[in-house]
Image (cartoon, rainbow, N blue to C red):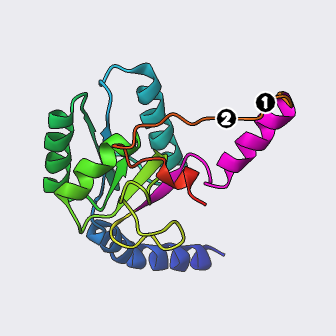
């Protein structure tokens, strides 16, 4: 029995340097995150905490096998500057964490780094993607709701207030976001 234990330990020791080299060869992945908010905003601090915790649960530990570079900006000029800075750090992916406001500066800063947007109202109408089914380019992500929901809102209004015979939509035609909701 001791011989088997000795041979097992010896076999494990012989493979140890190989496994160590394999781990050392793996490069540190970089994730850029851009928020259109101030760094002390509790809602957005909660979002970055959830992202970090979820990555840990998936085996990605900040500083060990992944580096999360977070940038905060509250003005359009700051967003453009922070987007350019994130891109210059050569991330593997960038998360546009606060929707439409962060996606445009990132798309202006890079056409190569993948961008994942969160909570964009109308990515097609905003020109961020070609279509929801096949985004194309380097951006993809999540919308707030599916376009077909807009018609359901009108149906719901008719159920709540059956006497209503006319409804109007107020929107700024200079803002491309949301135009897909009102199409045929």
Foreground residue, 131 or 183?
Answer: 183
Q: Position of residue 43 (x, y in %)?
A: 46, 24
Q: In the rendered view, would you say 47 is above or below 145?
A: above
Q: Position of residue 98 (x, y in %)?
A: 40, 39
Q: Position of residue 76 (x, y in %)?
A: 20, 35
Residue 118: tell me if it is visible. yes
User: In percent of the image, x 67 and y 55: which residue is there?
Assistant: 148
Foreground residue, 49 or 164?
Answer: 164
Furthest-front residue in view?
165
Foreground residue, 51 or 97?
Answer: 97
User: In percent of the image, x 39 and y 43: which residue is there?
Assistant: 173
Q: In the rendered view, would you say 3 is above or below 66?
A: below
Foreground residue, 156 or 86?
Answer: 156
Quarter residue 33 falls in: top left
Q: Quadrant of the C terminus?
A: bottom right
Q: Are marks 1 and 2 in contact (CB under 8 Å)?
A: yes
Instruction: Answer left or right for 175 relative to 153.
Output: left
Q: Quadrant of the N terminus?
A: bottom right
Q: In the rendered view, would you say 140 is above or below 72?
A: below
- Classify mark 1: helix, strand or loop: loop
* Highlighted range, magenta: 140-160
* Mark 1 residue crowding within 10 angstroms, few (<14) / some (14–19) / many (20+): few
Circle 1 sits on which residue?
A: 164
């Amino acid at each position: 029995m001791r011989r088997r234990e000795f041979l097992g330990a010896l076999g494990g020791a012989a493979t140890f340097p190989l496994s160590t080299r394999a781990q050392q060869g793996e490069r540190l992945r970089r994730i850029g995150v851009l928020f259109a908010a101030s760094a002390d905003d509790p809602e957005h601090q909660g979002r970055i905490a959830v992202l970090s915790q979820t990555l840990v649960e998936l085996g990605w530990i900040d500083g060990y096998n992944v580096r999360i570079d977070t940038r905060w900006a509250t003005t359009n000029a700051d967003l453009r500057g922070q987007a350019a800075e994130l891109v210059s750090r050569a991330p593997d992916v960038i998360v546009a964490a606060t929707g439409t406001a962060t996606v445009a500066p990132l798309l202006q800063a890079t056409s190569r780094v993948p961008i994942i947007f969160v909570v964009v109202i109308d990515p097609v109408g905003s020109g961020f993607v070609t279509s929801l089914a096949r985004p194309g380019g380097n951006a993809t992500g999540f919308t707030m709701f599916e376009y077909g929901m807009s018609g359901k809102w009108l149906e719901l209004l008719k159920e709540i207030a059956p006497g209503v015979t006319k409804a109007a939509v107020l929107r700024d035609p200079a803002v491309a976001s949301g135009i897909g909701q009102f199409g045929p």
